[in-house]
Amino acid sequence: MAKDKYRKLLRLGIIEENPVIVQIIGICSALAVTNLMGNSLIMGLGLTFVTAISSLTISLIRNYIPKHIRMMVQVLIIAAYVIIVDIFLKAYMPEMSKALGPYVGLIITNCIIMGRAEAYAQINPPIPSLVDGIAAGLGYTLVLLAIAFVRELMGFGTILGFRVLGDWWTPWTIMVMPPSAFFLLAILIWIFNNKRNGEVSK
């Protein structure tokens, strides 16, 4: 039964209630860092770590947090884990830290993390909250990677920094620019919701 429950949580977070393409939250960073797959992967893993561990922590202490200050406590916990991610990147991946710039710090304000803390971790046991956080983070990461795949391939002719398209390919400058992320995300949302609505109608 527990396995089925965790499997359902993963399916909900990654597909059925994907935070970006279903709930339409956390899209600022999704649009900002998706010009390269490497950036998107690190950003996604960072957010997954923060979402999962902060949800676990909040669930563990949920019965001891006064309700009138719970939001402040949640933000404090999230900020602590974001600082850990930021320090790790600066220490071990300085180039990636520079490339992501302020967006790592802005994980603190990401609606996905606060949403999972309030909607799930605050009222559920620790392990399910951890799995829920992982699922939401992975759902976010997969959307980022899907957008970054198209942008990097068409904008640079590379995938994860490795050249895939030869000299014959003329890079699409628009794909390197932020507006392309809006169009790609909109197309992805349209495709996903069309498919989902079609399955529901059947």
Image (cartoon, rainbow, N blue to C red):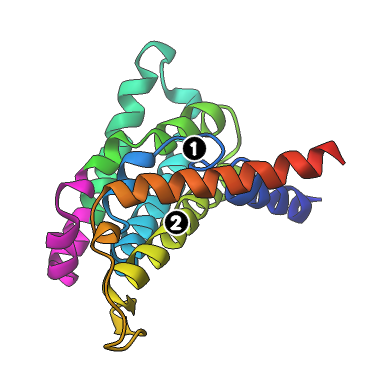
The kind of residue on which mark 1 rests is: Leu
Please name the residue that numbered disc 1 is placed on. Answer: 60
Judge whether 118 appears above or below 164 on screen. Answer: above
Q: Quadrant of residue 88?
A: bottom left
Residue 10 x, y percent position in the rendering: 63, 52
Single out the mark in the foreground, 2 or 1. Answer: 2
Q: Is residue 86 visible?
A: yes
Residue 35 x, y percent position in the rendering: 28, 60
Q: Indicate whether residue 95 is drawn in magenta.
A: yes
Judge whether 137 appears above or below 150 on screen. Answer: above
Q: Is residue 30 visible?
A: no
| Label 1 environment density (alpha carbons within 10 Å; few <14, some 14–19, many ≥20) | some
**Disc 2 to disc 1, how far (Cα)?**
25 Å
The residue lying at 42 percent from left, 45 percent from top is 51
For marks 2 and 1, the one nearer the N-term is 1
Tell me where the magenta segment starts and ends, as one range.
86-105
Q: As rendered, which of 169 and 24 lies closer to the eye?
A: 169
Which residue is most to the top?
68
